[in-house]
Image: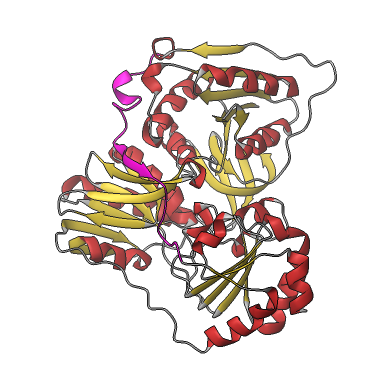
């Protein structure tokens, strides 16, 4: 079997999700593995180190013409290289930790016309020209050739002693034979207007002692829930399409004429593929300014496919939308959550996957971060005992200590309880953007300067053990 693994270098390290993709490839006995990466020359060394792990050939696509590529342009460049290799299977990490879009894998599959499975948690087997997997949604099977996008489901092995690194083939735009008009900024309809330090959701934090926590929770539970409001713009886009009821309110806030499309059963692949094809045909004949998808497993899989077919822009996991009546401006965390980016599409229709608030059954949610992960069972027990909801940050899910369903954050779910308690959570934008609509936020962290406190109404400076001693 011939396998391509798409890899991204981030700050001279390999994207962790892509390391998991490579480990999946290495698990296929006797496979011929090709690493394909697009980036700067500094990526040579980390990619070369990977070549020590087995029968691996590495290819770096490096040219100034590629600079500034969005996911549409990136998918194009990668797919042109992959076509030359003609693999049976392409394995991508679910997303990169800097961009977090999860769009490149689906885009590559569409450019190649390969089968696609996303959010893969386990590869059961391959036989009779098919691959059998377990995903976050259901069991899925696909015909070869295929692209699969894997979650952080394993740990990359260490190289064997004495295994020497192999040279990395470096290809320029001309060497690859790509159309430079489809690369870099020229070929990127999704463009950043500006980026800035995120201050949305900041609160005035009052520091209290650990013994006050239970009383604050009891008092705040008596209050009315905070009403969620979506800004309605005076000047609106003429025609906006909402794919699914979850994004209808956002569509109405920016669109004068809104058309709603019902989403098919996400477990029914053939229905979903038919739906996207019908939507594509309709968009080629009707006038539409923007199409909104939910930032769900389904939306993150099919919106990039539509993007490639229409050759338009797509912004992932938007936390806020605005319009001046002519253009749609989309906001999302960027650069690993350090900043917020304001983004627009230079072509119409603009596509966006939009974050929506999850229906919060519990008026109190206790969430655990990496700083309190050693006490996760104690916090879960406390939450269950008191009838509270339970959540975690992404690093906790990545360690395998909690299921994805519990993840609160940009790539998890948005929540809006009366009270949100963040224990051992640092406060990255990728987490705080998901709790903006909570009524009261209480942070627990031993570091008084932790970023989380800027997004809290109350702050408790103590360790997880200290707060549990008071609560339990």
Q: Tell me, yes or no, whether the highlighted magenta stretch contains residue 60.
A: no
Outermost residue toward the right? 161
Outermost residue toward the bottom? 222
Q: Main secondary structure of the magenta part?
A: loop
Q: Which span of residues is magenta-colored?
A: 177-203
Residue 91's place in the image compared with 138, above or below, is above
Q: Quadrant of residue 396?
A: bottom right
Q: Quadrant of residue 181?
A: top left
Residue 119's place in the image compared with 248, above or below, is above
Residue 440's place in the image compared with 22, above or below, is below
Residue 402 in view (yes/no): yes
Q: Is residue 368 left or right of residue 235?
A: right
Q: Report the number of discs.
A: 0
Image spot of residue 10 (x, y percent): 56, 31
- Residue drawn 32% across and 19% down? 180
Observer-nearest of 21 and 278: 21
Image spot of residue 201 (x, y percent): 43, 62
Q: Is residue 450 left or right of residue 312?
A: right
Q: Is residue 242 left or right of residue 77?
A: left
Image spot of residue 28 (x, y percent): 72, 32
Observer-nearest of 84 and 221: 221
- Residue drawn 54% across and 76% down? 419
Residue 128 in view (yes/no): no
């Amino acid at each position: 079997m011939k396998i391509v693994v798409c890899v991204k270098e981030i700050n001279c390290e390999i994207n962790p999700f892509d390391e998991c993709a490579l480990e999946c490839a290495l698990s296929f006995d006797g496979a011929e593995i090709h690493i394909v990466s697009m980036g700067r020359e500094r990526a040579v060394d980390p990619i070369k180190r990977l070549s020590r792990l087995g029968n691996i050939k590495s290819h770096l696509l490096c040219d100034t013409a590629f600079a500034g590529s969005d996911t549409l342009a990136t998918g194009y460049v990668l797919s042109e290289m992959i076509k030359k290799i003609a693999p049976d299977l392409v394995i991508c990490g679910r997303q990169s930790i800097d961009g977090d879009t999860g769009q490149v894998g689906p885009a590559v599959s569409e450019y190649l016309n390969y089968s696609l499975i996303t959010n893969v948690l386990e590869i059961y087997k391959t036989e009779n020209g098919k691959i059998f997997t377990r995903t976050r949604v259901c069991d899925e099977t696909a015909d070869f050739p295929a692209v699969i996008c894997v979650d952080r489901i394993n740990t990359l092995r260490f190289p064997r002693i004495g295994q020497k690194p192999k040279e990395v083939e470096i290809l320029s735009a001309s060497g690859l034979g790509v159309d430079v008009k489809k690369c870099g900024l020229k070929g990127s309809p999704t463009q950043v207007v500006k980026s800035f330090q995120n201050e949305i959701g900041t609160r005035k934090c009052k520091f209290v002692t650990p013994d006050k926590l239970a009383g604050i929770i009891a008092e705040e539970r008596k209050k009315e829930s905070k009403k969620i409001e979506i800004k309605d713009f005076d000047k609106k886009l003429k025609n906006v399409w909402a794919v699914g009821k979850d994004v209808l309110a956002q569509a109405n806030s920016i669109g004068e004429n809104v058309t709603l499309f019902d989403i098919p059963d996400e477990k029914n692949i053939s229905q979903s593929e038919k739906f996207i094809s019908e939507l594509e045909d309709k968009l080629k004949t009707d006038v539409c300014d923007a199409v909104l998808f939910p930032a769900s497993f389904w939306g993150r899989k099919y919106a990039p496919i539509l993007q490639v077919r229409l050759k338009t822009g797509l912004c992932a996991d938007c936390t806020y939308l605005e319009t001046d009546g002519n253009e749609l401006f989309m906001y999302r965390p960027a650069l690993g959550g350090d900043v917020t980016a304001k983004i627009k599409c230079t072509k119409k229709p603009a596509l966006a996957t939009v974050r929506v608030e999850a229906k919060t059954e519990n008026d109190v949610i206790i969430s655990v971060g990496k700083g309190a992960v050693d006490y996760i069972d104690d916090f879960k027990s406390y939450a269950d005992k008191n009838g509270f909801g339970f959540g975690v940050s992404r690093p906790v899910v990545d360690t395998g200590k909690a299921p994805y369903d519990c993840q609160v954050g940009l790539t998890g779910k948005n929540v809006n309880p009366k009270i949100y308690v963040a224990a051992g959570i640092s406060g990255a934008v990728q987490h705080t953007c998901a709790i903006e609509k909570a009524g009261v936020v209480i942070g627990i962290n031993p570091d008084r300067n932790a970023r989380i406190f800027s997004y809290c109404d109350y702050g408790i400076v103590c360790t997880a053990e200290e707060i549990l001693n008071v609560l339990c």
